[in-house]
C-alpha cells in the first residue's frame, strides 16, 4: 500500500470512528500535526517581521513561503476535521472553519492593500488584523479540541503559546522599530537603501530621520504598554483558567520569551535586524499566577488589577535595564478598566457555560 492509500485509509477510519485503542493515538497525531502547522506559521511570521525591516516587500519572500506551508497544513487539517468530524466538536469545528475562511479572504485583501498603498509596513493595518483574527480563531478551535481530548498540559501550553504570539505580534513592530531608529542614528541603518528610499518616497520626503520614524514607529507611544497589558495579559489569564494548572500563565509567557530569545539569536546570527525581547511580560504573567492562588471568586478580578501595573512596571524596568520601545504610561488606568471588563465578561461566560455544559474547565 502506497502513502496515498495509507492516508486515505487512515482518514476513512477517522470518519467511521476508531475503536478506543486507536482513538487516543490518532488524537495525539492530529494535534501534533496542528502543533507543527502552527509552529511553521509562527516561525514564518517571526522571520517575516525582521525581513520587512531589512528588505522591500516581496509576495514570494522565503518567510511568506514558510508561513504558507504551515497555512496549507492547517487548512488540510480543517478539511480533515470537517470531513471526518473526528477530534473536534461542532463548536470547535465551526470556529476553525470561520477562522480559515477569514484568513483565506484576508490574503487577497492584504495583497490588494499592498498594491494600492505600497509598503504598509505597520503590523497594525486592517488587512494584517484580518490575518491575525483568522489565525486566532483557528488556534482557539484547536485549544478547545485539545481540551475536549484531555487537555494534557504540554501541548495545551504550546497551543496557548501560539495564541499568545499571534495576539502580541503587532507589538513586534515597535520592538524592531526602536532599534532600527537607533541604528539610523548611529549611521548604520539595518534597512537596505532601496527600502529606505521606498518608505521615504511613499510619504514624499527625502531619506531622513522623519521618514525613518514614520517607517519604524508609526503608532502612538501609549499603545505598546497598553496592548501588552490588556490583550497580552487577558490571553495569559485565559490560559491559566483553561489549562487549569498552577503557574500556567508563567509557563506560556516564559515559553514565549524563550522562543523570542532563540529566534533573536537565529535572525541576528544570519544578518537580519534585531528586536527587543519583551522580558517585561514575565512580571505580568507572575502576577496572574499569584492572583490564581486566591479563592476562586477573587481570582479573575485580582488578576486584572495586579497584571496591569506589573506589566507597566516591566516596561519601565526593561527600558532602564535593557531596551524597550518608547512608551507613554498615562493610559494605565484605562488598561486596568479594560482588562477588568474583559475578566468580568470571562467570569460571566464561564458561569453561563457551566450551566449548559457541566464539563467546562474551571480555575483552581
Image: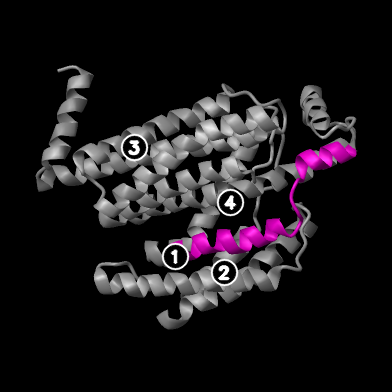
Tell which residue pokes out farthest to the top in this image: 2
Which residue is drawn at the image coordinates 72% and 47% (left, top)?
A: 174
Are the residues at dot 4 and dot 1 in contact (C-beta closer than 8 Å)? no
Badge 3 or badge 4: first in the primary sequence = 3
Name the residue: 60% across, 44% down: 126
Q: In percent of the image, x 70 and y 57: which residue is there?
A: 223
Q: Is residue 221 magenta?
A: yes
Q: Secondary structure at mark 3?
A: helix
| Tag 2 secondary structure | helix
Query: Mark 1 vs mark 2: which is more N-terminal?
Result: 1
**C-alpha span from label 3 to label 4:** 23 Å
Give the side of residue 44 with respect to residue 297, left or right.
right
- Label 4 sits on a secondary structure element that is helix
Gap between marks 4 and 1 measured at Cα: 17 Å
Residue 34 visible to the viewer: yes
Quadrant in which the C terminus appears: bottom left
Residue 25 picture location, percent across and down: 21, 42
Q: Relative to 66, is 239 above or below?
A: below
- With respect to residue 240, does 22 lie above or below? above
Q: Which residue is mark 4?
A: 168
Marks 4 and 2 sit apart, C-alpha to C-alpha, by 15 Å
Q: Hey, which quadrant is residue 347 in on the image?
A: bottom left
Quadrant of the drawing holding the N terminus: top left
Residue beneath disc 2 = 339
The CA span between labels 3 and 1 is 24 Å
Question: For residue 352, which numbered disc appears in the image?
Answer: none
Helix, strand or loop: magenta stretch = helix
Q: Nearer the viewer, mark 4 or mark 1?
A: 4
What residue range appears in magenta?
209-238
1 vs 2, front mark: 2
The residue where tag 3 is placed is: 33
Give the labeled residue for mark 1: 240
Amino acid at each position: 500500500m502506497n502513502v496515498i492509500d495509507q492516508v486515505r485509509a487512515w482518514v476513512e477510519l477517522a470518519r467511521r470512528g476508531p475503536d478506543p485503542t486507536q482513538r487516543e493515538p490518532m488524537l495525539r497525531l492530529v494535534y501534533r500535526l496542528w502543533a507543527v502547522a502552527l509552529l511553521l506559521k509562527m516561525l514564518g511570521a517571526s522571520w517575516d517581521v525582521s525581513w520587512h525591516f531589512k528588505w522591500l516587500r516581496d509576495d514570494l519572500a522565503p518567510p511568506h513561503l514558510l508561513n504558507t506551508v504551515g497555512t496549507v497544513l492547517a487548512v488540510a487539517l480543517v478539511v480533515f476535521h470537517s470531513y471526518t468530524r473526528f477530534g473536534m466538536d461542532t463548536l470547535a469545528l465551526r470556529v476553525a472553519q470561520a477562522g480559515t475562511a477569514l484568513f483565506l479572504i484576508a490574503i487577497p485583501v492584504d495583497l490588494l492593500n499592498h498594491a494600492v498603498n505600497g509598503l504598509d509596513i505597520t503590523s497594525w493595518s486592517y488587512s494584517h488584523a484580518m490575518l491575525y483574527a483568522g489565525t486566532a480563531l483557528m488556534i482557539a478551535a484547536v485549544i478547545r479540541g485539545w481540551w475536549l481530548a484531555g487537555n494534557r498540559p504540554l501541548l495545551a501550553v504550546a497551543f496557548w503559546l501560539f495564541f499568545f504570539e499571534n495576539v502580541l505580534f503587532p507589538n513586534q513592530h515597535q520592538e524592531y522599530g526602536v532599534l532600527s531608529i537607533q541604528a539610523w542614528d548611529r549611521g548604520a541603518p539595518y534597512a537596505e537603501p532601496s527600502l529606505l528610499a521606498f518608505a521615504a518616497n511613499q510619504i514624499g520626503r527625502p531619506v531622513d530621520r522623519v521618514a525613518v520614524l514614520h517607517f519604524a514607529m508609526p503608532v502612538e507611544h501609549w499603545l505598546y504598554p497598553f496592548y501588552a497589558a490588556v490583550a497580552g495579559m487577558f490571553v495569559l489569564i485565559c490560559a491559566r483558567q483553561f489549562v487549569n494548572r498552577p503557574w500556567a500563565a508563567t509557563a506560556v509567557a516564559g515559553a514565549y520569551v524563550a522562543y523570542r530569545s532563540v529566534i533573536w539569536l537565529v535572525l541576528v546570527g544570519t544578518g537580519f535586524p534585531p528586536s527587543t525581547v519583551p522580558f517585561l511580560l514575565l512580571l505580568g504573567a507572575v502576577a496572574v499566577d499569584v492572583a490564581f492562588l486566591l479563592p476562586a471568586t477573587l481570582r479573575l478580578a485580582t488578576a486584572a488589577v495586579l497584571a496591569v501595573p506589573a506589566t507597566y512596571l516591566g516596561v519601565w524596568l526593561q527600558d532602564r535595564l535593557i531596551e524597550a520601545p518608547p512608551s507613554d504610561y498615562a493610559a494605565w488606568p484605562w488598561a486596568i478598566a479594560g482588562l477588568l471588563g474583559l475578566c468580568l465578561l470571562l467570569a460571566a461566560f464561564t458561569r453561563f457555560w457551566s450551566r449548559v455544559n457541566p464539563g467546562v474547565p474551571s480555575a483552581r
